[in-house]
Image (cartoon, helix red, strand yellow):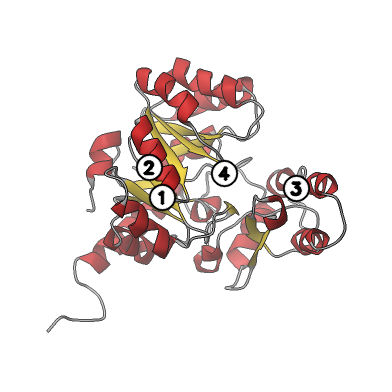
Amino acid sequence: MIKTELCDLLGIQYPVFQGGMAWISDGKLAAAVSNGGGLGLISAMNADAAYLKKQIDIARSLTDKPFGVNIMLLSPFADEVAKLVADEKIDVVTTGAGNPSKFMTMWIEAGIKVIPVVASVGMAKLVTKAGASAVIAEGGESGGHVGELTTMTLVPIICDNTNLPVIAAGGIADGRGMAAALMLGAVGVQMGTRFLVAEECGVHPNYKKKIIKANDLATMTTGKRLGHPVRGLRNQFAKDYLKAEYSDITDEALEKLGGGALYRAAIEGDEKTGSFCAGQISALVTKEEPAADIILDVVTGAEKILSGANRFSIQ
């Protein structure tokens, strides 16, 4: 079975992370992924410390394996949740949407492994100097907030510019994606969209159905005008938002237009006005299954490819 330095670093069986998805990655899903041998992550999203503490308690009641918390640094509650994870001595913290440097000394002193999401060489170098344990190189194929570079390009560039272990994210949902990531220099993968259809994922059933039915052209990117592009499934909300971006609407009104859209999709299942964040890999996600089975399928698939059971030979 595939084992990398990431497994030893974090005490996990397989080098597979579950992405921190707002309104989706809760304590139950994180525990299921960790019990399956990967690293489950709770999303702190825009919630306060009380919400996060509840999810941490749920995860700890369901698993004795390592799990982590993803902190969205643009959250108005970033300071209080940053302190909470330090007080709780969470195993791993991943970060996104900003620079985590101001919190890293506190987290490292608490014994936490800090693994920021990076979309550029500059950010990778910055967090390397600040004491990160590893980085997640996330390409623009991923769901939710995305950068400009693709995973195929970003991963090797990041590997060449840091001595830290690199986890690849974006466009990975099966053994082929994991094998490709490892060949690019990564030591593990992070998946979000694939875990959306885990049986233990509590997202609204309409969300899962839309992922399973998605085809190769199902996603689109909006939000570039405001500097925070988001990839999601193509529905009426996404099309209306994109149209508004190129109108004379004010930035303030455009920002307001997107307010609550992910909640409406993930919690209420609103197929018209909800924002169904999802990666381009949605077309390869075809069924709902336990988180442990998802992990095993990806890892064994990658192992089969990397061990030589492929469609070519070297003469």
Residue 154 or 301: which is nearer the viewer?
154
* Residue that lies at the very extreme toward the top in this rendered image: 87
Residue 222 falls in image quadrant:
bottom right
- Kindly check if marks 2 and 1 are in contact, taking CB atoms under 8 A apart as contact: yes
Residue 242 or 61: which is nearer the viewer?
242
Q: Amino acid at mark 4?
A: Met
N-term mark: 2 or 3: 2
- Kindly check if marks 3 and 4 are in contact, taking CB atoms under 8 A apart as contact: no
Circle 1 residues within 10 Å: few <14, some 14–19, many ≥20: some
Q: Which residue is mark 4?
A: 21
C-alpha gap between disc 1 and disc 3: 31 Å
- Kindly check if marks 4 and 2 are in contact, taking CB atoms under 8 A apart as contact: no
Q: Amino acid at mark 2?
A: Lys
Q: Position of residue 158 (x, y in %)?
A: 36, 52
Circle 4 residues within 10 Å: few <14, some 14–19, many ≥20: many
C-alpha gap between disc 4 and disc 2: 25 Å
Asked which secondary structure carries label 2, the reply is helix
* Residue occupying image coordinates x 66% and y 51%: 227
Asked which secondary structure carries label 4, the reply is loop
Q: Which residue is mark 3?
A: 261
Quadrant (top left, top right, bottom left, bottom right) of the C terminus: bottom left
* Residue occupying image coordinates x 19% and y 71%: 308
N-term mark: 3 or 4: 4
C-alpha gap between disc 2 and disc 1: 6 Å
N-term mark: 4 or 1: 4
Q: Residue 121, labelled with which disc?
A: 1
* Residue occupying image coordinates x 66% and y 52%: 205
Residue 132: tell me if it is visible: no
